[in-house]
Amino acid sequence: MTDISLSIAGRAPARRARMFPAALGLAVLALGLSFTFAVGVGAVSVGARTVWGVIANQLMPGLVQVTWPAGHEAIVWDLRMPRAILAGLVGAGLALVGAVLQAVTRNALADPHLLGISSGGAFGAITALLHTGMILGLATVPIFAFAGALGAMALVLGVARLADAASAERLLLAGVAVSFIVMAGANAMIFLGDPRASHTALFWMLGGLGLAQWSHLISPAIVLALCGPWLWLRAQDLDAMTIGDETAATLGIPVSRFRLEVFVAGALLTGVMVAFSGVIGFVGLMIPHVARMVVGGSQARVLPLSALLGAVFLIWCDLFARTVMAPQDIPIGVVTGLVGGLFFVWLLARR
């Protein structure tokens, strides 16, 4: 009876591994359909044929015959496409960070906010919105938010080094401590700032993609293209870290240094995404768990699937945020917070 039970238990990981190609293909299909739907839906509905016709005409003028009004082209190309692409990039980036943090900390509830990077980004954005003004034009808020995120990352690493906190638990505690301190400073700046601008700062802290432009996509795309493959190439090391520091060390992995490298990569990825989207929570908590339920615990499978599912999830959250109370946008962080809170309760009940 024991042999039969062990045989059945051993089949589950193998079955999930075999599901990976199909799951990846379905996720890619879902991403394409989600993108098409998100670009086409709004106050002015645009059909899927027109959406892809506009894209083809912009990329290769004259490839297709223009049969749509000029206004539809402006809506698709200038307004909705940058927003949908930014949602996909941010969702993919935050999901990747959540997956690797849960691996190196062996904490099922770890997500990018535990590093304090989102709080640092919020601090920088509030500084720009309420105190310095748009001294660098439209790029002021993203630049200040990115600088705040990098500063928070440096502060977390500095606290960890000062306290000789190389273990997973102490690094997380350093991130949580820095997050509370930085967010307290951000709240104080809102309290002391211009009350008329506080609404804008609050909306940014809750997350939003309504200001997305083509120029805003460059930095998130570059950072995701650099950090994503690097993390995937270290998938075996991440698998070893999930077992324990001792096991990873016996396999020749410099545990403390590797964990810090992953934290730096995750902080950079989170900081850039937060700089252009505001503070969006729970994506990094939920999506990796969903990916592991489908394809098992191997990081080589979890990371790409998490990125795709994160992109799909945030595209739909943004679509809901801009249509449920149209023409007014609600902060996307409200939507992800509601879904994430319910998922959090379910996760606690399950484990």
Image (cartoon, rainbow, N blue to C red):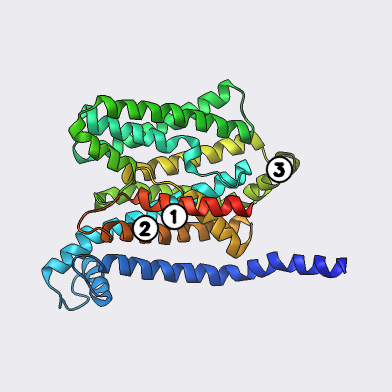
Question: Splitting the image into 4 quarters, where does residue 20 fall?
Answer: bottom right
Toward the left, the furthest residue is: 70
Whether residue 135 appears in this view of the structure is: no
Q: Position of residue 196 (x, y in %)?
A: 18, 34
Question: Splitting the image into 4 quarters, where does residue 1 fall?
Answer: bottom right
Q: Earlier in the sequence, mark 1 or mark 3?
A: 3
Q: Nearer the viewer, residue 255 or 337?
A: 337
| Residue named by callout 2 | 317
* Label 1 crowd bin: few (<14), some (14–19), many (20+), radius 10 Å: some
| Figure check: 160 above or below 299 | above
Q: Position of residue 290 (x, y in %)?
A: 54, 59
Q: Is residue 45 left or right of residue 179?
A: left
Q: Nearer the viewer, residue 148 or 319?
A: 319
* Label 2 crowd bin: few (<14), some (14–19), many (20+), radius 10 Å: many
Toward the top, the furthest residue is: 162
Q: Is residue 284 left or right of residue 78?
A: right
Which amino acid, by three-letter code, is at mark 2? Answer: Cys
* Label 3 crowd bin: few (<14), some (14–19), many (20+), radius 10 Å: some
Question: Splitting the image into 4 quarters, where does residue 86 fall?
Answer: bottom left
Q: Position of residue 215 (x, y in %)?
A: 25, 49
* Helix, strand or loop under label 2: helix
| Figure check: 180 above or below 282 | above
Q: Nearer the viewer, residue 30 or 186?
A: 186
Which residue appears at 25% of the width and 60% of the height? 80
Query: Circles 2 and 1: CB distance less than 8 Å?
Result: yes
Q: Nearer the viewer, mark 2 or mark 1?
A: 1
Q: CA distance from mark 3 to mark 2?
A: 35 Å
| Residue named by callout 3 | 244
Q: Nearer the viewer, residue 7 or 221?
A: 7
| Figure check: 230 above or below 3 | above
Whether residue 258 appears in this view of the structure is: yes
The numbered disc on residue 339 is: 1
